[in-house]
Image (tube, rainbow, N blue to C red):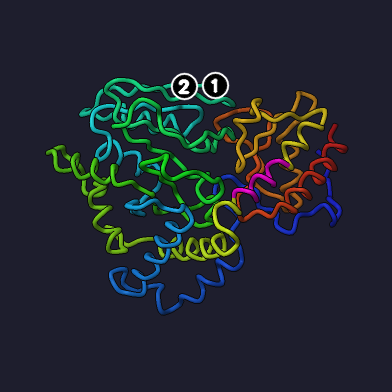
Amino acid sequence: MADISLPAALLPADGRFGCGPSKVRDEQLTFLASLQPSVLGTSHRQAPVKDLVGSVRAGLAELFRAPEGYEILLANGGATTFWDSAAHSLVERRSQHLAFGEFGAKFGKATGAAPFLEAPDIRSADAGSRSQAEAVAGVDVYAYPHNETSTGVMAPVVRVAGDAGALTVVDATSAAGGIDFDANEADVYYFSPQKNFASDGGLWFALVSPAAIERIERVTSSGRYIPESLNLAGAIENSRKNQTLNTPALATIAMMDEQLRWINGQGGLAWASARTAESSQVLYDWAERTPVATPFVANPEHRSQVVVTIDFDDSVDAAAISAALRANGIVDTEPYRKLGRNQLRIATFTAIDPEDVRTLTGAIDYVLERLV
């Protein structure tokens, strides 16, 4: 492939569009540096660190407009750890899972492997579409992603009609902080902080309802064997003390704290959701009017606000587009590795400026003119 040099006018101010770890704002790093040496490298059982954790918990409760009695939990690990924790500490007998991408399916596999649970009810859909939850006798947890990071499919946060006693458990890793929702519609809204919160990994967070707390307390006192690191009752106890079982990743907490102040100061979740909707629509509109491109998610109502997937026809090598962009400092536009499609996957997380997304479409046009 011939070298392609983009004109300066087609270079975004920040070229990070990855769907894994998000672009991190400079202000977050400045705040992190300000914690040296008073917080970094000090005991996580003492006030400076616990105050930082408490600030994040309060910021999340404000952002999510937490209903009365809901609590913010956190613990060591990521979403995979939470799936194992939920299998041990939250699902009582049987769960139903919507699998319309890599991550919804993984939670179903976790409950399916638990010898003390009944086989889960897994409702699958082809990549690029989504499945629907349905009330089933004996199911006590309904689980699905708010946003499927692997495919760019978004689902509404709603309870399953006709099953008031079950819990609604929502994987929000790539949605939390970037897509608005009604917290009353979920019992557990859990996520890792490296997407819209522009932080690092190492922790999971969750907004949990009183019904979920009651369920956790009942399951964990039932005599079921639960490893200490996966016991959600322990996460409740530690979170109320603004701490975690083991030493938390302080850089993760600090960058998240600053991101929460920024989002809440700008107008909260409604502002963030409008921002990601604007950025993603720029890309969908571009794909609709570009002859060689099309949105991978055919139904506009299913299209994600924060992860945009765009297919290209056989006349275009999407990998060559990504390579040319990367050579010019525009990075991480490659598709999800297991999807295997001729496409770009572009994040429009809250930290990403809509103007940079507009500039990106011009850069892609420039590359296409020289590749086709």
Q: Where is residue 307 in the image (x, y as percent from the top left)?
A: 61, 40
Question: Residue 278 lies in magenta, yes or no?
Answer: yes
In the image, which disc is placed on residue 124?
2
Look at 87% across and 38% down and name the residue there. Answer: 370
Quarter assignment of residue 216: top left
Question: Residue 150 lies in magenta, yes or no?
Answer: no
Which residue type carries mark 1? Asp
Q: Position of residue 140 (x, y in %)?
A: 29, 30
Quarter assignment of residue 45: bottom left
Give the magenta-colored segment's residue range: 273-281
Numbered label tally: 2
Look at 55% across and 57% down and name the residue there. Answer: 268
In this picture, residue 159 sits left or right of residue 332: left
Quarter assignment of residue 137: top left
How packed is label 2: few (under 14 Cα within 10 Å), some, or many (20 or more)?
some
In the picture as drawn, the residue positioned furthest to the left comes out as 223
In the image, which disc is placed on residue 138?
none
Which residue type carries mark 2? Ser
